[in-house]
């Protein structure tokens, strides 16, 4: 593997080659599905960020607004707790 390999992956979609980074530029979680891909095409973020930030603040988002660090951190905590709860729930079964 090359050390200078960048972190973009290639997605082939009906003959068009488009790229999506491995990680959301906003929340830095992994982007790995079609929802994330289309959210990235539209809003340059993952599907979760689209739902939480981009859609509710569409006009501001289009003019360059992004959530501040405080909002982003509590959002990330929420996402991580959500995944943790799912994990614990599965463990209990
Ligand atoms: Zn995100």
Image (spheres, rainbow, N blue to C red):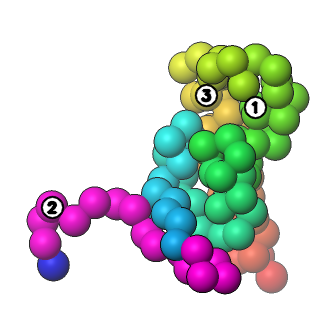
Q: CA distance from mark 1 to mark 3?
A: 10 Å
The answer to whether one can see residue 70 in this image is: no
Does the magenta-highlighted stretch encompass residue 4?
Answer: yes
* Residue 4 circle label: 2
**Element assignment for label 1:** helix
Residue that numbered label 3 is attached to: 72
Of mark 2 and mark 1, the one earlier in the sequence is 2
The image shows residue 87 at horizontal and vertical percentages of 68, 68
Give the residue at mark 1. 53
Label 3 Cα crowd, 10 Å radius (few <14 / some 14-19 / many 20+): some
Sooner in the amino-acid sequence: mark 3 or mark 2? 2
Comparing 78 with 92, the one in front is 78
Residue 11 pos. (x, y %): 54, 75
Tell whether 30 sits left or right of 79.
Answer: left
Q: Judging from the image, what secondary structure is the residue with disc 3 in?
A: helix
Picture quarter with the N terminus: bottom left
Q: Circle 2 sits in a helix, a strand or a loop, which is it?
A: loop
Q: CA distance from mark 2 to mark 1?
A: 32 Å
**Label 3, ligand 1: CB separation under 8 Å:** no
- The residues colored magenta run 2-16
Is there a contact, CB below 8 Å, between mark 1 and mark 3?
no
**Can residue 59 be seen in this snapshot?**
yes
Front: mark 2 or 1? 2
Quarter-wise, where is residue 91 in the image? bottom right
Q: Quadrant of residue 59?
A: top right
């Amino acid at each position: 593997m090359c050390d200078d390999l960048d972190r973009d992956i290639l997605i082939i979609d009906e003959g068009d080659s488009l790229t999506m980074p491995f990680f959301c530029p906003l929340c830095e979680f992994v982007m790995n599905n079609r929802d994330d891909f289309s959210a990235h095409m539209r809003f340059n973020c993952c599907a979760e960020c689209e739902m939480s930030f981009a859609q509710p603040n569409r006009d501001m988002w289009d003019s360059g607004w992004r959530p501040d660090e405080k909002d982003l951190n509590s959002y990330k905590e929420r996402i991580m707790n959500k995944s943790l709860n799912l994990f614990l729930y599965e463990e209990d079964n």
